[in-house]
Image: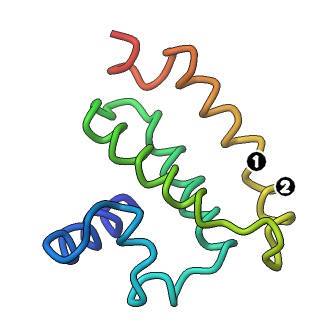
């Protein structure tokens, strides 16, 4: 997932100003509904706390997660089900980040 995000960022880097604009670009937005955005967000958060994640990767993943979350509409079909599925793990990851316990690069 991280590689896909990096490729998108590299592809549109010169045309667009930041992750927010990239995710709103027709070529990207037309292929992502709220459910997919939440699933990608959850995967990026999960990868953000894996051992070996450096601060640059952590920053990249969090930037994308925030941008994805900003685009999710609460009234979209299937959002409640996806949140029920990924919410507990996402909460765990965010708590680990908040306390500085993971990733190890954040703790040091």
Q: Residue furthest left?
A: 14
Q: Circle 1 sits on which residue?
A: 87
Q: Where does residue 77 sit, x and y in percent of width and height?
A: 82, 79
Is there CB contact under 8 Å for labels 1 and 2? yes
Q: Where does residue 5 sit, x and y in percent of width and height?
A: 35, 65
Tell which of 11 and 87 is nearer to you: 11
Q: Where does residue 45 sit, x and y in percent of width and height?
A: 52, 45
The image's mark for residue 84 is: 2
Question: Is 9 located above or below residue 57 in the figure?
Answer: below
Q: Relative to 75, is 7 on the left or the right?
A: left
Tell which of 60 and 42 is nearer to you: 60
- Give the mark count: 2
Packing grade of label 1 (10 A; few <14, some 14-19, many >=20) is some
* Residue occupying the point 40% across, 12% down: 107
* Residue occupying the point 54% across, 54% down: 43
Q: Secondary structure at mark 2?
A: helix
Q: Secondary structure at mark 1?
A: helix
Q: Relative to 81, is 29 on the left or the right?
A: left
The image's mark for residue 9 is: none
Q: Quadrant of the N terminus?
A: bottom left
Q: Where does residue 9 sit, x and y in percent of width and height?
A: 26, 67
* Residue occupying the point 51% across, 15% down: 101
Q: Relative to 62, is 90 on the left or the right?
A: right
Q: Relative to 105, is 42 on the left or the right?
A: right
Quadrant housing residue 50: top left
Q: Quadrant of the C terminus?
A: top left
In 3D space, how far apart are the residues under numbered discs 1 and 2 (Cα atoms)? 6 Å
* Residue occupying the point 61% across, 32% down: 94
Quadrant housing residue 90: top right
Question: Is 15 located above or below residue 13 in the figure?
Answer: below
Quadrant housing residue 23: bottom left
Q: How is the image coloured?
A: rainbow
């Amino acid at each position: 997932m991280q590689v896909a995000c990096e490729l998108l960022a590299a592809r549109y880097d010169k045309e667009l100003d930041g992750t927010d604009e990239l995710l709103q670009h027709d070529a990207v937005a037309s292929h992502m509904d709220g459910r997919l955005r939440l699933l990608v967000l959850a995967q990026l958060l999960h990868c953000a706390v894996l051992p070996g994640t450096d601060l640059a990767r952590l920053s990249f993943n969090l930037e994308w997660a925030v941008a994805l979350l900003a685009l999710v509409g609460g009234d979209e079909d299937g959002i409640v089900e996806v949140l029920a599925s990924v919410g507990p793990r996402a909460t765990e990851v965010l708590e680990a980040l908040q306390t500085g316990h993971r990733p190890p690069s954040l703790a040091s």
